[in-house]
Amino acid sequence: MTPKSNRKNKTVVWGHGTTGLADKCAPSASQAVFWPEARAAIAALLAKGWTVTAPDYPGLGTPGAHPYLVGLSEARAMIDSVKAARNLDNKLTTQYAIDGHSQGGQGALFAGQIAPAYDGALVLKGVSSIAPVSNVQIFAPLIPGTPGQGYLVMGLYGLNAVNPAFDPNSVLAAPAKQKTSVLQSGCLYEVLAAYETLTAEELLVGGALPQPVIDQLAANDDPAQSAPTAPVLLIQGTDDEAVPYGLTAGPLLDQLTGYQTQPVDFVSVDGANHDQTVFATTGQVADWIAARFA
């Protein structure tokens, strides 16, 4: 997406939040999952004169399964989108930034880790990460028996996409297995609705994930496993129903700042839920990125 006027010839990647696993859940192909908060965030970036790329992520609308929450997959897609934009528009400079929410916030942090080794001649100036998934070893065991169980089921299938030796059916209980067709027939809200009323024992064999599965999820899904290579803006709403505030404001913030390689700014949005946090900070994020580009 390119602004009609006031072009600055710099690129910002928008990393979308969870849409689902099915091909029809690709935001570029379906306005229904081009979420309102994504539209607001992108509008603020375009208003600054920046070109915005918005990758669907691998497996959404393309052959193969979507490696949901596999951070390196998302990160490469984000950086690849900047390369693709420059192939389409030779006026775009090498400077770029990344702005992502939820799944996209997690992917943005991964992109910030791999950028110098992966982006070639590009120059990453900053990473904005809103309500990112993190610390799966703490987070995943809390999910069974809660309304957000659909996210965990999608996460298990995301792991299967990169590790076919892991079969989600080996840990899903019979009532959960009976609902897996929704992963291809529906998108996020249909998936969440299908699983939200199950008990932990109806979701998982024994009501809990085996530790080896948690370890595999953490290895693929946890950001901050290596140092950030560009400044980070970390944003989290205090009333987030999808990503616990304490995980972002606690362990994740500690992990990112502990490397002491890049400045990390943390913004707490009082009273905001998962999507409200994006709406509340579109201008703040755009101004922060503008300062990194300056």
Image (cartoon, rainbow, N blue to C red):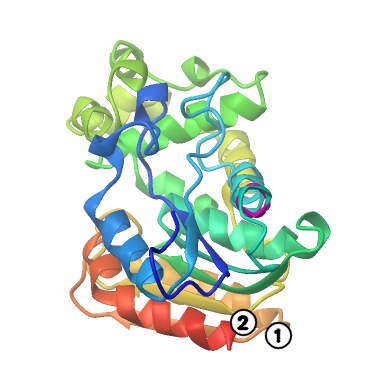
Horizontal and vertical percent for residue 176? 32, 19
The type of residue carrying mark 1 is Gln
Please tell me the numbered disc located at residue 236: none
Label 2 sits on residue: 257
| Viewer-closest of 256 and 126 | 126
Which region is colored magenta? 82-86
**Point 52% across, 29% down: residue:** 66
**Point 67% across, 83% down: residue:** 262
Please tell me the numbered disc located at residue 260: 1
**Image marks 1 and 2: residues in contact by CB distance under 8 Å:** yes
Q: How many residues crowd around disc 1 within 10 Å: few (fewer than 14), some, or many (20 or more)?
A: few
Q: Is residue 274 above or below residue 203?
A: below
| Viewer-closest of 163 and 108 | 108
Q: Secondary structure at mark 2?
A: helix
Where on the picture, by quarter, is residue 22?
Answer: top left
Where on the picture, by quarter, is residue 21?
Answer: top left
